[in-house]
Amino acid sequence: MKKQFSLFRYYFLKKVIKTKRDIPIYVFGHHKCGTKLLGKVFLKLCLKYGWEYESVPGKINKKSKADVVFLLHSQVDYDNLPEEYIGIHMVRDPRDVIISGFLYHKRTTEEWCINKNFQTEKSIQYPQVPNSQMYRSEQWKKDYLISLDGKSYQEKIKALNDEDAIFFEMNHYGKWTIKDMLEWDFEKTNCLELKFEDMMSNYEEKMMEVFKHCNLSSSQLVVAKKFAEKEDLNRMSKKDIEKHPHISSVKTKKWEGYFNSNIKAYFDEHFSEVLKKYNY
């Protein structure tokens, strides 16, 4: 009943009252960088205040009219950003991105990760490849499917020992995410820059910084704070965390327990640039 009332209020505000933010909010995320956490909080705010919410799983190819736009992978066509917007961009230590992805892709039920359709005669579409990689050339998509050797992404990872599975993740989704992080242009965006690690260590303060950056009113700040508290991983029990498929633990620097000398040397040789860019 409570959920039905929330939806009714949302459609009443949006369609009848026609509520609209003066300046839209753009949230730029990356895979395994706290994207779901921010998304849940902003979606609740949109439902509460009748703001239009748009989630973009790949490249944005048109100008959005939504009040809150969430680019899950920060794949930005700068020409399609509005002249004025409030931006938030969150990153994470790319070494933890790799380990978190390695753990997540072993258990997720996302369609692309368990896809067993390897046809290449027709146009290759989601879920044959992730939405985040749909912008790639048809040849790239074919090469990706062939590289899986008749296994789903998940089957491929689960069939390998941990070291080889981490190398696989590093050269696939980890590499794709690092590419997006490297292509991010600080000068072309007007964003509050956040790190997942800071969010985890000082959650309440960082979330309030986000809300104030979004110019929320004093009453909206109170509501936003309550929504954020419900998504605070540090307040969750182990059982609560286990109910969230996107979360394996609240620990940061997990990579230190997984990177042996071979993995560390390979990462440093191929991906050290991203550590420098984001001061990790």
Image (cartoon, rainbow, N blue to C red):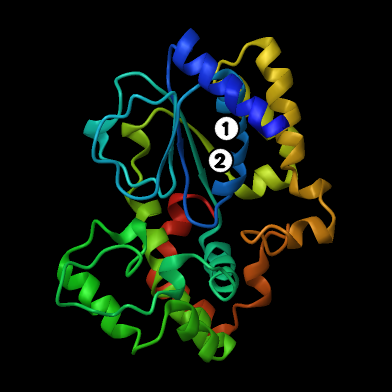
Counting other residues with Cα less than 10 Å from the Cα at mark 2, is it few (<14), some (14-19), or many (20 or more)? many
According to the picture, the residue beneath numbered tag 1 turns out to be: 42
Dividing the image into 4 quarters, which one contains the C terminus? bottom right
Q: Is residue 155 left or right of residue 125?
A: right
- Residue 137 is situated, as x and y percent measured from the top left of the image, at 17, 64
Helix, strand or loop for disc 1 = helix
Give the mark count: 2
Q: Nearer the viewer, residue 194 or 156?
A: 156
Asked if the residues shown at circle 1 and circle 2 are in contact, with their CB atoms under 8 angstroms apart, the answer is yes
Dividing the image into 4 quarters, which one contains the N terminus? top right
Q: Is residue 113 left or right of residue 256?
A: left
- Residue 182 is situated, as x and y percent measured from the top left of the image, at 36, 53
Q: Is the residue 150 above or below the residue 153 in the image?
A: below
* Rendered image quadrant of residue 148: bottom left
Q: Which mark is residue 39?
A: 2
Q: Looking at numbered disc 1 in the image, what kind of residue is underneath it?
A: Phe
Helix, strand or loop for disc 2 = helix
Q: Is the residue 20 above or below the residue 58 in the image?
A: above
Q: Is the residue 38 above or below the residue 270 in the image?
A: above
